[in-house]
Amino acid sequence: MHLVVPAGGTGGARFVRGLLSALEALPGPHRVTVVANTGDDVTMWGLRVCPDLDTLTYTLGGAVSEEQGWGRQGETYVVRDELAAYGVLPTWFALGDHDLGTHLTRTSMLAGGATLSEATALVAGRWGLPARGVELLPMTDEPVETHVRVRDADGERLVHFQEYWVGLRAAPEVVEVVAVGAEASRPAPGVLEAVASADAVLLPPSNPVVSIGTVLQVPGVRAALEATAAPVVGISPLVGGAVVRGMADKLLPSLGVAVDAGSVARHYGPALLDGWLVDTVDADLVPGVVEAGIPCRAVPLLMTDVPATAAIAREALELAGVL
Amino acid sequence: MHLVVPAGGTGGARFVRGLLSALEALPGPHRVTVVANTGDDVTMWGLRVCPDLDTLTYTLGGAVSEEQGWGRQGETYVVRDELAAYGVLPTWFALGDHDLGTHLTRTSMLAGGATLSEATALVAGRWGLPARGVELLPMTDEPVETHVRVRDADGERLVHFQEYWVGLRAAPEVVEVVAVGAEASRPAPGVLEAVASADAVLLPPSNPVVSIGTVLQVPGVRAALEATAAPVVGISPLVGGAVVRGMADKLLPSLGVAVDAGSVARHYGPALLDGWLVDTVDADLVPGVVEAGIPCRAVPLLMTDVPATAAIAREALELAGVL
């Protein structure tokens, strides 16, 4: 089976890890193409940082900090502390020493003319992703950076998503989310081909606004997902009207979308979705989703560990009809 | 007293530390302007690295690794090991994690339009150099990079000084030393003014070819040293016909200079030097230096510790006639 998973960071990475575990129990071979959101990317300390690509790589490569859900396990912060002592570079977006090796390597490759796809493949290669049957692609090789128009006591202003999320801790009201550069971007090599030839596409419980929503803004990607013969099945990132992690609950209202599992399904819409999983606590939302033309089931959706996540992935594959 | 010290890295830094100790025993106030060689500078991992400036800063700021004579004490190499695991960036020039904070800060300042002088002042400020009465200036704000034309089994080629010294461990024969960019460079702000207003200029036992020799190649610097009313007194980097550390013995022949304390004095010449100190083991070389028109004394020159180095600095100040 060939599965395609458009994904953000922590939630997407944990879902793919569970999916790989589910696939191991099925007669193979299987392969998974992950199309990562790059809208969270930021240039920090002069280095190109790709949080979602790295969280996916570290998680699937067994190097992620399980407590955080991002970054490297056993991380140290010697460089960050030194920068703080100098006081020139901002340290609110702390990059760890191990992590810096990734950013320095990627930045150097990009400066030398490599594409983000090429740098991503090099990094993923070190962490053994190809050997696990995973191909990790950025959604695009062009720079796209999600910005958020926020409103607080200081007035209204456009800030980088990382400044909103990490720097301002998602405190200000969100007026608008803008994927700067998305309109002029093109899908990275392999993205449209993977969607077209997939046996199924799974949307993990990543942020529907700034993770999967951003991937969908790369021209051609939504159309490819709507056109593919493969079933597209999504997993709700909202459980009981709240986010399991992240800040989707604060961003959905800016799109006029209510903060519940059914509203997110209708936001994606029946042209995109061929199936939708909600948590058992949201079973009452199933009829409304089905009524909108999207097959829907209620199953346990908390990714508490790898086996629980594998069970979710298996439910998605079943709903997709590929088991 | 205002003293000016053109200097390279380890030897220069240790000498200045001894000089500060000697000055503390004299009625003050005193100040020392150090004009650092920047010809060893190199762009590594995309970062601007200034080895001599940093060795001077760390040594005078009490943060240097005493064992190495450069780099930070208690240094760690997490980032370097990560880069080695990726295998894209070269790791023969290892930058430590603590040290990286300096390079990231400086590189970011330069990218933002600051001069090397401004970045140097910021770094030196953190390490308390102004409070110790030390002003640290780069010889120039323009990029100058010393290259070495080497000859070995692979033939003749021009390599960066760091590749010759660190990468090739000074093994190949040296045909020529070229300070690329020196001709078009200008002395950094304050350099010529410091030389003109100094009470004495001391040349520490730094490399006469690639440290002090490079500073002298910045247009206007040698002329200012020859024209200043201040006495210029140098300390031989060679003791008993050998280098105490470094590779001056391998570079001097490329200039046609013999590897002994007297020949180095004559290479600098009487127009530049108003005094020269050789080690007691080289006492037999004193008459030849005096004959060349350079007052000369033989005193113990091994900088074994700070008191021994302070004694050398005191001898230099005495020979300069400023005590």
Image (cartoon, coloured by chain):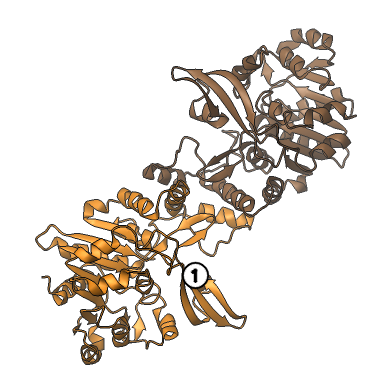
Chain colours: A orange, B brown
| Image quarter (top left, top right, bottom left or bottom right) of the C terminus of chain A | bottom left
Q: Is residue B116 visible?
A: yes
Q: Position of residue A181 (x, y in %)?
A: 46, 67
> Which residue lies under the disc numbered 1?
A166
> How many labels, in total?
1
- The amino acid at mark 1 is Val
- Which residue occupies the foreground of this view, B225 or A85? B225
Question: Which residue: 21% across, 55% down?
Answer: A133
Q: Is residue B62 left or right of residue A118?
A: right
- Which residue occupies the foreground of this view, B115 or B158? B158
Question: Which residue: 26% across, 72% down?
Answer: A225
Q: Is residue A32 left or right of residue B318?
A: left
| Image quarter (top left, top right, bottom left or bottom right) of the N terminus of chain A | bottom left
Q: Position of residue A42 (x, y in %)?
A: 48, 62
- Outermost residue to the left: A27
Q: Is residue B300 left or right of residue A229?
A: right
Q: Is residue A128 left or right of residue B192?
A: left
Q: Is residue B26 visible?
A: no
Q: Position of residue A194 (x, y in %)?
A: 24, 62
Q: Note whether B165 is above or below B140 in the view shown.
A: above
